[in-house]
Image: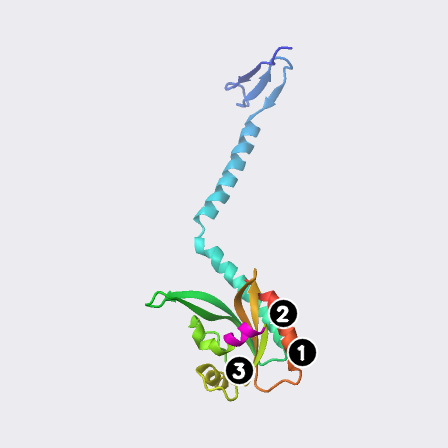
Amino acid sequence: MSVMKITLLFLLNDKHHKGYLYSNKHKTMLNYTEIITSLLTATTTLGGIWLTNFLKPKGEDKVSSHLMKKQDTLDKLSTLQQTLHSDRVNLWYFSNGTQYYTGGHLQNLSCFAEVNTPGFDSLEMQFQRIPIQFFERLLFKLTQSEVIIADERNEQDDLGIIHRQYGVKFIVCTKVISKGKWVGVLCASYSTLPPDIDTIKVKLRLEASKFTN
């Protein structure tokens, strides 16, 4: 069986000024103008979408993602604060800093998000990229245990003094683990020692898994 021959005719002089596809075998005439128009329209639409995305500021997606993550974290912290009946809950993440003159690595700890009861001032803006040495006492305890409680009433280091200035007398902290790595700290602070402190420690530890990066 021979191959069908297809002849493409442009009928430029007919009263409709349309092009047709003519088949020698079946004598079938198809309007190809509409097909080409559809293809051009689709191509133009896809090109416009691509151009819009190409010209979109690269940082916009990162900002949007950060804001969405921040709001999601605040919602979780708000729920956690109500569950634990705490005066403050906050989430801290480790971050890389610069280097010491000796070449040693400097690591920081920053407050990513926080929820406070009325009358409790926020720590978030003041505690960004703080060298981890400032939190050495609590961090060392966390290397020994998954969750700790610290009595800040008589601590004389800078951390204890600042805690009391902000109304914190007791603080419960637990590690935040992501993919097997210690990436942050989740804390609940109290102006008075809660009677169900052991239950609080268990709940805080369980909730920490919701705050991985």
- As helix, strand or loop, the secondary structure at mark 3 comes to loop
In the image, the segment drawn in magenta is 139-145
Residue 55 position in % (x across, y down) = 43, 48
Task: Looking at the picture, tell me which residue is in the foreground, 153 or 33.
Answer: 153
Q: What amino acid is found at the position of numbered circle 1 in the picture?
A: Thr
Residue 40 position in % (x across, y down) = 51, 33
- Residue 91: mark in rendering: none
- Residue 199: mark in rendering: 1
Which residue sits furthest left? 101
Q: Return the residue at label 2.
A: 207
- Callout 2 environment at 10 Å: few (<14), some (14 to 19), or many (20+)? some
Asked if 191 appears above or below 202 in the picture, the reply is below
Of the 4 image quadrants, the one containing the C terminus is bottom right
- Callout 1 environment at 10 Å: few (<14), some (14 to 19), or many (20+)? few
Asked if 111 appears above or below 58 in the picture, the reply is below
- Callout 3 environment at 10 Å: few (<14), some (14 to 19), or many (20+)? some
Which residue sits furthest front? 144
- As helix, strand or loop, the secondary structure at mark 2 comes to helix
Colouring scheme applied when the structure was drawn: rainbow
Which residue sits furthest top? 1
Of the 4 image quadrants, the one containing the N terminus is top right
Q: What amino acid is found at the position of numbered circle 2 in the picture?
A: Glu
C-alpha distance separating marks 3 and 2: 22 Å
Sequence order check, earlier mark of 3 and 1? 3
Residue 32 position in % (x across, y down) = 56, 25
Sequence order check, earlier mark of 1 and 2? 1
Q: Return the residue at label 3.
A: 120
